[in-house]
Image (cartoon, rainbow, N blue to C red):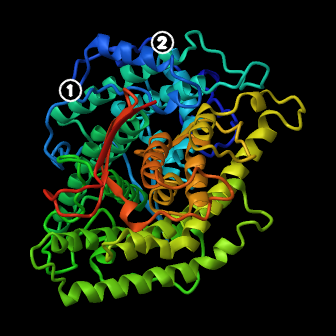
Amino acid sequence: MEESSTRTVRQRRASKPKVKTGCRKCDGYPAYNPKNRSADVIVPILPRPPPSEASSSASSSSASPPGLSPLLLASSVSSSSRPAISSSRVLVRKPPRQTKRHVVREATNGQLSLTRYQPSVTISFTPQENLYFQLFREHTANELSGFFNSTFWTRSVLQESHSEAAIRHAVVALGALYKTLEKTCESPPGSPDNGTVVVHDTATDHYNFALLQYTKSISRLREALETKEVRSQRMILISIVLFTCFASFTGDHQTAIIQVQSGLGLLDERRQNQTQAFDDRNDTVEDELIQIFTRLAIQAKSYDMAFHFPAPYVIRLSPNTVPSSPQSPPSPSDSSSTASADTIIPDIFSSVQEARLSLDLLVERILRYQEALTSFYTAPDKIIPSQLRSSAIGFRAQLEQWQTAYKPILDRRRAPGITNTERAGIIVLRMSFLNAWILFVMSFSTSEMHFDTFMSEFHEVVELARELVVDEELSLAMKKCGNHPYCHHRQNSHSHDHYYAAQTNYRDEQDYNHIKASFALDLGIVPSLFVVGTKCRDRRLRREAIRLLFASPRREGMWDSILSGRAAQWIMQNEEEQLSPYSPQTAGEVVPEDKRVMVKEILFDLQKREATLRCGTRGKAGEVDIRARETTISW
């Protein structure tokens, strides 16, 4: 009896509601432990700005014009203080492996492989860090996913933050940046808010805290690398994605490109190790993470093709390509599909995700093909080998096949049951295809006049972009103000839309007053609208494309809609300087061939909100170009 009376009674587990994001134990974020303050220690790192520089940058960001400032925040790394970094060799060393975490690989329906972790529950968070972490989990993760659902942001990143301090601080930094964006785009007085109360609740406060956490994140990663405590290459790759995201968010495209180069270098080293019979089951990298780097490589390459960056901020998808062959070394995507000259495209895509993955692989191979093609255009004889010409025929056939397989999905985007996010993803994917199609076909042309053959594609891009923006505007208007007849937002339309109307003597009746500035890591509508704004000579269409860039301020990865709109507007003004002022009666006037120009270079500083634009013709380097122009803009 005594033995039974002294026996410890086992306490039953408390019943908790199931969760859908992050750790199954704590819904992606832990309880704050005030006794553990080790994460508060700041270790100086490089690159970093002087304290006064970071403070002044943050202070200036809070005084920016509404509708523009959230996308033009200063970076924590100034270009003058940034040390030279060789491409692809920043974070590429594989550390010793430690078995502190159990990994189980599971297959689901033969398509996706899931990685299940058992994270640590003991995490050091200050109350302020915990607040931003919750903000990331509840809002930022979905925003970063863009127009497509991504478990990388809503699950993988949150899980890794439990055991990796570098990732944890990067997540908090992105949450603080999201709050900065939210504060600088606040609704006008009288509009509903989310009820969140923060003690230090200004854009400058949130931004300074984001810089502090970003610095901590880089410091923790460097410490882990130096002490060989990094558990896996997967952790390094996730950190690189987060650093790239932070740099793109703050407008530091140079740092973003360097980070992408580092990730590509690490993946290439990992691939080489695997070809040497290397197999580490405790260091798995899921397909989605590899696909993210594929898209980042495509994004950086498309950005360079549009703005023409100087070295070393240039992504080479095929650094060892032999110009006589279209085949290239493996890229971030699966080597078997990338190195092949053919991509298997079904008769009909079963889902948007399947179509997206297929288009990513196809576009990436086309970009590597265009790298090889460019080397022949710069050669003295300009003779393109027959193998490259035959590959072009194959790429064109695959693009046409993709379009056919995608049409059923595009046609049912307005069907019942399709959410706004799903519909937006369908639209964006179609716009990306049209952009890839136009640029691929025009890679074999040397005349700006040939762009006139794509008027139907230009028109579809503008209509699809307008459809997406109108859906977004209506959804936000209903969410924020409902059917309120005295909506405060109608009196506060975007300043850039008014500026554009004043400069071009053209204004559409539709205003988008509820859309806030936004950020996503993936590409959306900006690159396609930029191509229409610079290459479409239909005066009405190109104005509508530019207006959409201004009226819907957003940053998609490295692409900034305001900068893209200003650059396209300057090109348009140069080409139309001898045409009649725009009006419905003069909309049919056409830019003559001897007035058409192309973007030669755009050097910009989003921190200072200024850019140097250069345009000209397709002549050889060093030749006199009578149409060459240069200007400096600020906003």
Q: Secondary structure at mark 1?
A: loop
Instruction: Locate residue 301: give its quadrant.
Output: bottom left
In the drawing, what numbered circle is on residue 34?
2
Q: Residues within 10 Å of mark 1 (few under 14, many from 20)?
A: few
Percent across and percent down for residue 373 are 23, 74
Percent across and percent down for residue 54 are 34, 17
Q: Residues within 10 Å of mark 2 (few under 14, many from 20)?
A: few
Q: Which residue is mark 1?
A: 80
Please tell me how many numbered marks the rendered image carries.
Answer: 2
Residue 285 appears in the picture as rendered: no
Instruction: Locate residue 329: give its quadrant.
Output: bottom left
Mark 2 or mark 1, earlier in chain = 2
* Dot 1 amino acid type: Ser
Q: Label 2 vs label 1: CA separation?
A: 39 Å
Percent across and percent down for residue 51 are 29, 12
Residue 412 appears in the picture as rendered: yes
In the drawing, what numbered circle is on residue 429?
none
In this picture, is 588 found above or below 17?
A: below
Percent across and percent down for residue 92 are 18, 48
Q: Secondary structure at mark 2?
A: loop
Nearest the viewer among 117 and 69 is: 69
Write the residue at 42% across / 18% down: 58
Write the residue at 15% across / 78% down: 382
From the viewer's perspective, tell me whether residue 272 is left or right of residue 401. left
Nearest the viewer among 437 and 178 is: 437
Nearest the viewer among 316 and 574 is: 574
In this picture, is 582 found above or below 498?
A: below
In this picture, is 177 found above or below 370?
A: above
Position of the N terminus by quadrant: top right
